[in-house]
Image (cartoon, grey):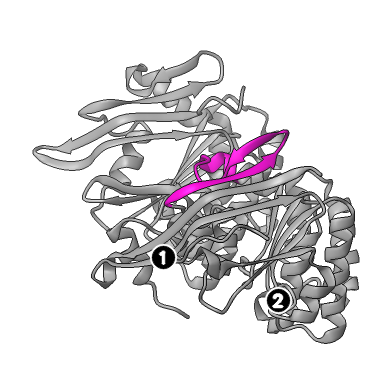
Amino acid sequence: MTAMLRIENLGKRFTLHVQDGAEIPVFQGVDLALDAGDCVALTGPSGTGKSSLLRMIYANYLCQEGRIDLWHDGAWVDMATAAPRTVLDVRRRTLGYVSQFLRVIPRVPTLDVVAEPLRAMGAPADAARDAAAALLRRLNIPQALWRLSPVTFSGGEKQRINVARGFVAPYPVLLLDEPTASLDAANSAIVLELIAEARARGAAVLGIFHDRAARDAVCTDQVDVTRFKPGSKAVSHA
Amino acid sequence: MSDDAPLLRADDVTVLYGARVGCRDVSLDLYPGEVLGVVGESGSGKTTLLNALSGRLEPASGRVVYATRHEGPKDVFALTEPERRFLMRTDWALVHQNPRDGLRMGVSAGANIGERLMGVGWRHYGNIRGTALSWLDKVEIEAGRVDDLPATFSGGMQQRLQIARNLVTGPRLVFMDEPTGGLDVSVQARLLDLLRGLVADLNLSAVVVTHDLAVARVLSHRLMVMRDGGVVEQGLTDQVLDDPQHPYTQLLVSSILQV
């Protein structure tokens, strides 16, 4: 097994200065490891910080303690302390992230939005567009929409564009935040297929799946994040 | 040149206006291909910093060092005036908030672009006109407008013309001061899309001063938040905006109106 992600003793709290300096502790003592080919589900009730943990790994949120070692380009990079330039390089070549929200610039056509991550990895424009088109077709996005910006798309369509962006490039590590939320059964099944294919090529996947059936279908393990709640006794990973 | 060496570097730059502080102890590194956003309210010192970085306002203390193409890192304020002017014409570009400050309003669109080329030694009329036309196309201005005066252009077109005029000489570093300020939202989106594409295609480094956090999010890789002349927070753009640490940054981010 090739280790891809090692999280050690990670802690996170928010300090809300505009609200009388309120302290909101989110995690302490997060330990988690992911090998190539793993698909681990983060579980726990809403508001326990599952999405926050993904954002910390993506270096979108800062960490107050601990480390997040990610295998990138033949070496470990600590995402909790890496310089912005390094983080951007990790995001470009190693770490994919499907968030719950699609953030795009108006005017950029859907096909280019989806092709962009592959272009950023260095693929030629034509090859990137072909791969994007194949994925959009597979995710049942009508071809008439490919030339339009996804800004005005429905929630389910935006979600599929987000999924397509995450799977168009062969990221070694993938973070998935509710990738099947707001999708019908048929499209949801396609997303699960994509996850299985990513695992088969060796990707390590860490995800949040509200749908138990989806989780059971693709995940090799699960981690309940409530065990990392500050004040609770840390339990070793089963 | 190695990507591991900064293109532009500031060490503890302080600018004073008499007894008043313009900006204080600002240090930064800007690497090739990197876009740094500088945000803050009016009077926070962001434009002062931009003027110091671009060699137009000498700091009271501190240094600005630029990695020249042929002679390596040079202190910008130790250069002679002709050397600095040459840098401004070749390696650097400056996009003003008001296109009228960056364009020559009395000559045609084509001449505005051509003038920069002639400044670096181009003499062949056909080549100059051909390059001007191709840049008009890049910034989405119809070729038929090449002989029109900028005054007959809309604000958004003038701004795009200013960008073409600046980028035609193939600079490595672009300074932008509120590049989308004063434009309608739809025009802004088009300009942002264009700027982002050009910065990526030409592998430009840029320092973009803006008070608009949405503009900063779209254009910049890294963000620096200024207040009262000092830097209160800096980091990866999405991290600073999504998980701001400093009270002032939290106030700025939480003050944005949701659409």
Count all numbered tags in the image, as a single digit. 2
Q: Earlier in the sequence, mark 2 or mark 1?
A: 2
Q: Position of residue A16 (x, y in %)?
A: 32, 67
Q: Position of residue A97 (x, y in %)?
A: 67, 60
What numbered label is drawn on residue B259?
none
- Disc 1 residue type (three-letter): Gly
- Disc 2 residue type (three-letter): Lys
Residue B23, placed above or below residue A10: above
Residue that protrudes farthest toward the left in the picture? B19
State the residue in front, A95 or B233. A95
Magenta highlight range: A64-87
**Can residue B255 be seen?**
yes
The quarter of the image holding the N terminus of chain A is: top right
Write down the chain letter for disc 2.
Answer: A
Circle nearer the viewer, 2 or 1: 1
Kindly state the secondary structure of the residue where label 2 is placed: helix
**Residue where numbered disc 2 is placed:** A158
Q: Position of residue B136 (x, y in %)?
A: 65, 51
The quarter of the image holding the C terminus of chain A is: bottom right
Residue at 25 percent across and 30 percent down: it is B59
Near mark 1 (Cα within 10 A), the count class, few <14, some 14-19 or many ≥20, is few
What numbered label is drawn on residue A231?
1
